[in-house]
Amino acid sequence: MALTGVLRPGFIQIRVLDLHASVEHYVARVGLHKVATGEDGRVYLKAADEIDHHSIVLRQAASAGFDLMAFKVAREADLGEFESRIKDFGYNVDHVPAGEQPGIGRRIGWTLESGHRLELYHAAEPSHPRPSFQNPEVWEHEPHGMRARRFDHAQLNGPHIERVLEFFEKVLDFSLVERIEGEDGLVAVFLSCGMKAHDIAFLNFPEPNKLHHVSFELETWNDLGHAADIIARYDVSIEIGPTRHGATQGRTIYFFDPSGNRNEVFAGSYTFYPDHPVRTWDARHIPKGVFYYERKIIESFLSVMT
Amino acid sequence: MALTGVLRPGFIQIRVLDLHASVEHYVARVGLHKVATGEDGRVYLKAADEIDHHSIVLRQAASAGFDLMAFKVAREADLGEFESRIKDFGYNVDHVPAGEQPGIGRRIGWTLESGHRLELYHAAEPSHPRPSFQNPEVWEHEPHGMRARRFDHAQLNGPHIERVLEFFEKVLDFSLVERIEGEDGLVAVFLSCGMKAHDIAFLNFPEPNKLHHVSFELETWNDLGHAADIIARYDVSIEIGPTRHGATQGRTIYFFDPSGNRNEVFAGSYTFYPDHPVRTWDARHIPKGVFYYERKIIESFLSVMT
Amino acid sequence: MALTGVLRPGFIQIRVLDLHASVEHYVARVGLHKVATGEDGRVYLKAADEIDHHSIVLRQAASAGFDLMAFKVAREADLGEFESRIKDFGYNVDHVPAGEQPGIGRRIGWTLESGHRLELYHAAEPSHPRPSFQNPEVWEHEPHGMRARRFDHAQLNGPHIERVLEFFEKVLDFSLVERIEGEDGLVAVFLSCGMKAHDIAFLNFPEPNKLHHVSFELETWNDLGHAADIIARYDVSIEIGPTRHGATQGRTIYFFDPSGNRNEVFAGSYTFYPDHPVRTWDARHIPKGVFYYERKIIESFLSVMT
Amino acid sequence: MALTGVLRPGFIQIRVLDLHASVEHYVARVGLHKVATGEDGRVYLKAADEIDHHSIVLRQAASAGFDLMAFKVAREADLGEFESRIKDFGYNVDHVPAGEQPGIGRRIGWTLESGHRLELYHAAEPSHPRPSFQNPEVWEHEPHGMRARRFDHAQLNGPHIERVLEFFEKVLDFSLVERIEGEDGLVAVFLSCGMKAHDIAFLNFPEPNKLHHVSFELETWNDLGHAADIIARYDVSIEIGPTRHGATQGRTIYFFDPSGNRNEVFAGSYTFYPDHPVRTWDARHIPKGVFYYERKIIESFLSVMT
């Protein structure tokens, strides 16, 4: 198939309370590489398999949480086309000049009715260290920490997720891969711009602009076991796992960065194709859809977020 | 990104010498499900995660080898569009009526300059057993044998692979993901229609229409270890592995079905995006590109095929 | 080192409420083989790697729980020697004639101050199916269900575990491998007759003769993931896991058979040698010692047993 | 069972051509820790899970190969008892004073008819770093390189292995776990002093005092995959693997240190008990006994050694 339009999650910018402790967490524990520190103090990180400049941006602030998430588009020209479509959908679009983040070209941004700021960009400088493409080794640098391979997706909580779903399907050409339906309507949607089970997920929540979790992909269930050892050994705050989701089938651990932002490491989801029926979880099966092994939802998973 | 055009490898039809022994091999060892036997004796099989009617067709014949490989397209209308583009490229296109294979709609077919017949189709009945999409379990039927999850790709050997490459890129909108370059030109190409490292591969070879291998995806390296135990326990003919490819990074075992058709089970390749530079292996590094652990090519891998 | 005296846990006899459902559970889910049904209705089962006649005995009764656990000794003559030592310690010893269980020779039995009946025996007929010893395959019969390899150990709850510890060390020549010490004294002991982290464990509990869990060994963490899938797919009652113990370092899942007897599947403990210092958990670290990932104890783990 | 007498392989001293490159190999690649350098230049290393001072001794010399292998006994008094028994068997016994190697007490030594020097010792200082025994973490120091957990065993090649077998069984109380029988007699023996499938192995070979390989235990097949990646990434000389042995069932990779001494990393063998029949491989099945997946023996495995 032709791969066009929105390619993938590019980066996410989150707020942290203690930049030093956060960098330690994401580098030594999660296994990212620090690539740059901006003049304004923001720190830029990347995971091992990523080819672009960075994927995680940490900004010191008085409260933890979500600043923005940006997707990479296939061509520079896509930015203009998507700007028109976004405006046609009724949203204001603003422009962020190249260089506002090191290594990233110009971006367009807008705010969803769930309260979250999203952005699109195309131009990105190569990451450093970067996977090799000439007689490439499986890795140039031995994996460390939890061995995160990529910033995979984020789950964002907020209101009006029916409208968010409509926007992603109609404007950004995402596919609805899974949906969780409660007795009073749509609870959650898992959206893909490619063949992953999700590139972004939204959960219905009364308060806007909340960050539920930032997720990093590991290779296998075995790496999840190693990640759990690291979490325990260094007394990282854990919420649940290793376990498995019914929705997306991802094997998973949830834990918290030093500022309370929820992280996920996950592995083992299925391959999605757009001719798949939408996987649907009804009210009675939600507990199994959320935590497949426990078959019950823990309270913090619904109430704790940044 | 919008997923359009050719979605994925749909099915491959291969010739076998002993249908009974072959079905035993693919069902009891590889772990497929038998879904139908046609009136003409062809046997139809599918892997666990596949949603369409079948993916492997076995046809009894006096010699083993390749009959055809068919890709599924996203929309019925794509068939007409691709027919025009294929004809414009200079190939004859013929039509196969719906029902020529059970559960599969009308197909269009043509022959590459490498000698291989390819086909496109859109309509397919659901597989049985089929993964569930309503409150889905991770599997409905406990995996068996090698636990193959899908027919993943095939490698075909023949002449004129530069032209084959040109055809796949220009007409079918595939991406060149990796290439192996020898001292006398292009040795092999790995082509993707989505985010897999390859959906089909071609190796330069003087004789046309040769089948190098049919590949099945397993979940992890651990499942490859189990597959190797099965291969040894039942004295299945093995060629090499468990090992790893440099190209595609897939962890792999090569073995033979009872008719001598080469099979691969593999796991653990990377995620491809179309903004990735083409991974390139030069002449000096070909051994590591082919067998990453051994760093040498075994002779049979170059000379034995059906 | 010379391996003498008590070799290993041989079998455990437990009471179940519904024999048919229990056999289904232990065979189809846990992955045991049924080897015999006695004239009195008791059912005899074994795990894949075990060489003796059986290791699990199910007896239908009005209440679930523990009947007895028997250890195999290296030589028939050991029975007499241990009988003397057990009597010298102050316990009555009774004799069970050969054939009281099919395939098992004469046994001697006694009751611990924790209320549990233990037995020793030497003679045992070969299991069927039995691993091969002449040009052995890694397995003769493809593993099924959770792929349990052996009945590994049991944890028994009852009073007077200081005396139980003294008995095992002085009379049966076991080693104390780990101990959990609470603020009011000894909480739990893990005892080994060989190089495993534990062959039996005792937890201090006011009520005598309680069964906390029967444990089966799996090969790896990967098999634990598969076991968790089975537990979820078939809605087997789960308590916790996949997780890890601090004590013994075993990766683990706890779940219940249809009668409420707790089962464990575990993998990945360390190799014990008798020159190891006793691993000790103090009151403050008990939660991490029990559930290394959660770092807290769930209430049911302390209160629910048969 | 009572664990008495010879406990386990304690350390092996091998000769290397380039001490610096060798230390790099065993520390950065295999994953050992360097613990000391002696005044005479010998370097002392240990693996992560070992509790005693060291397990690998590297001695710079003009030729690579085997100096000696030493077993730890359970009690200091065992040294005297074994000295008598060894002398009664007809061998000369010499004494090595405490401190000849740092951290190791007095040793007794003798030479087998296969030409190899063996030693016994009891006293050993704790290793540093050493696993914790008070509220122990699964590891104190994050595993690195191939994540070797222990020096597991060695295979030594030489003549008169029937006599070696007799010595180990009669004098050192080892068990014969597996034997390979060729058409002209005994080919190889696998000997255990505990519950491992082997603590030392001997292969019949005309030349005395040869080192076939030094083996390190990894946790799982997954770690073997990681080890293979390391071997390939750093172009370590590999012989074969990842594969599996029929004998011992160990999953394995063979490679060479910079001096040509063969190393093995392995995982996944079975648990041995002394009531197991001896696993026996006959002449026709030797290829499968040696390399279970390949079912053929590679020539270098028989001819290359130090």
Image (cartoon, coloured by chain):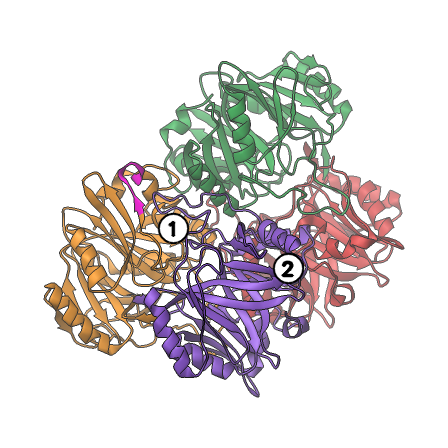
Chain colours: A red, B green, C purple, D orange
The answer to if D281 sits in the magenta stretch is yes
What chain does mark 2 sit on? Answer: C
Disc ID at residue D72? none
Instruction: Count neighbours of disc 1 (C-alpha within 10 A) and say few if under 14, some if 14 to 19, many if 20 or more.
Output: many
Instruction: Count neighbours of disc 2 (C-alpha within 10 A) and say few if under 14, some if 14 to 19, many if 20 or more.
Output: many
User: Seen in the image, is C56 located left or right of residue C3?
Assistant: right
What chain does mark 1 sit on? Answer: D
The Cα atoms of the two marked residues, 2 and 1, are separated by 33 Å
Above or below for D273 versus D302: below
Residue C131 shows in the view: yes
Residue A28 shows in the view: no
> Which residue is drawn at the image coordinates 61% and 82% (left, top)?
C206
The percent coordinates of residue C250 (x first, y second) are: 51, 65
Query: In the image, are marks 2 and 1 on the same chain?
Result: no
Mark 2 belongs to which amino acid?
Asp
User: Seen in the image, is D136 located left or right of residue A14?
Assistant: left
Residue at numbered disc 2 = C257
Residue at numbered disc 1 = D250
The percent coordinates of residue B269 (x first, y second) are: 54, 42
